[in-house]
Image: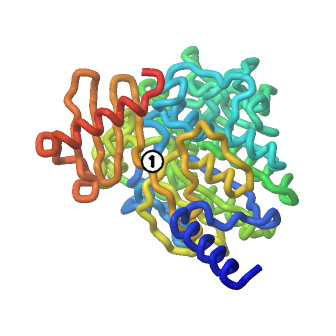
Amino acid sequence: MTCSLKLCRILFFLSFCLLFPFCVTDHLQAEERPNIIYVMADDMGYGDLGCYGQKIIKTPNIDQLAKQGMRFTNHYAGHTVCRPSRLVLLSGQHSGHTPISQNEQYYFPEGTTTVTTLLKQQGYATGGVGKWALGIPESTGVPSKQGFDFWFGYLDQGNAHNFYPEYLWSNEQEVSLPGNKVGPHKRVSISRETYSHDLLTREAFNFIRTHANQPFFLQAHYTIPHANNEGGRATGDGMEVPEYGEYADREWPQPEKGFAAMVTRLDRDLGRMVQLLKELKLERKTIIFFTSDNGPHQEGMHQVEFFNSNGPLKGYKRDLYEGGIRVPLIVKWPGKIKPDRTTDHISAFWDFLPTACELAGVEPPNNIDGISYLPTLLGQPQQKHDTMFWKYRGKVALRAGKWKAVQTGPNKPLELYNLETDIGEAHDLAAEHPELVARMKRQIAASQSND
């Protein structure tokens, strides 16, 4: 080969890399493929963590995760309520392309491709604890038929609103909790002995210990700090927790003591999980994601404003304003993610599937909306979304760069916000930018494949 031909090939390669920087992210070697732990709180707000501005509730262990890893400031849940948000996370498709876009009943069909089935095919041991919501017993949607080697927790999401249930599920085996008894409405606890969150944590830790010598994926979809709505109306306390701990003597309403204690209990168990990984010498081999399934709730007699749970954001659970869908995301991977980093990369739940696939060295499906944010985690050039979309009943929202369009009902006008200068969505600029509004209306229509 002549020197000139060699030079031409080198120049071509360099040009290719410059034109397509996103295809040159270093693929991890097989021995570098990490264990993946995805921890998700239930109804925790953008402002409920110290590292996101919380001043009262104590979250030292989660704050330490952020200190040792990367904190995302522009991360979005898959939805503004529970079931469709989980569906988006597992499928890699946003709610314009998923079969449901509200909390209606839905079971995964047999043979569904999810992040879990893809990781299982790649040789990962797959386990989960917490709230499932995508298949009741004897349906095709149960976790054991959707790629999970092991599952422990709730299957029907309605039962997950009680933290002292009479039973939980280990795969498809009902596990009785005889010390707990609920009333006729199935959500009001009459006797309380076993707190479900503590069992979920125990089983999560057991899964880690059992699979310490092989790659594993653990989905820990905890149910706190969700409210027990029925229990709250019946007993005056919709935030069930065994003790209020350091908040017991605060002169607060009872539900607020419970809410704070739930968040701090979850924080405690994240600290215990990290310590377990250290003991098993798995800390540097494991990437931990921590997030919430949607914005903060105002249920069970808890008030969003009491702890400023949505931080600087407008709205909360069931809204498509930022407070309903923008959530914390913290990712820690010692030795790979540089510590104490913050990113404003705009990402969402549907990006987790391709991110996990890239971590595991498996090709993601073509029919997804997600883009891997592993390049951001590793400090490499990152491909960005042109638009991001959500819908809930008659509401829709679309983000395109700094711009956010929100329609609060089918006959409502489209509102327009500049999130760079107005994170609280206080100033509707639609009248000032009619051409942008028209374009975003077209993008909203194009984002809904079945409408």
* Residue 448 as seen in the image, left or right of residue 364: left
Q: Position of residue 176 (x, y in %)?
A: 76, 27
Provide the secondary structure element on which disc 1 rests: strand
Q: Position of residue 222 (x, y in %)?
A: 60, 43
Please tell me which residue lies in front, 80 or 417: 417
Q: Position of residue 329 (x, y in %)?
A: 50, 56
Residue 120 occupies quadrant = top right
Residue 198 occupies quadrant = top right
Residue for point 41% across, 48% down: 386
Residue for point 27% across, 39% down: 439
Residue at which label 1 appears: 76
Q: Is residue 4 above or below residue 277?
A: below
Please tell me which residue lies in front, 383 or 336: 383
Any part of residue 177 in sight = no
Q: Is residue 412 above or below residue 92?
A: above
Any part of residue 339 in sight = yes
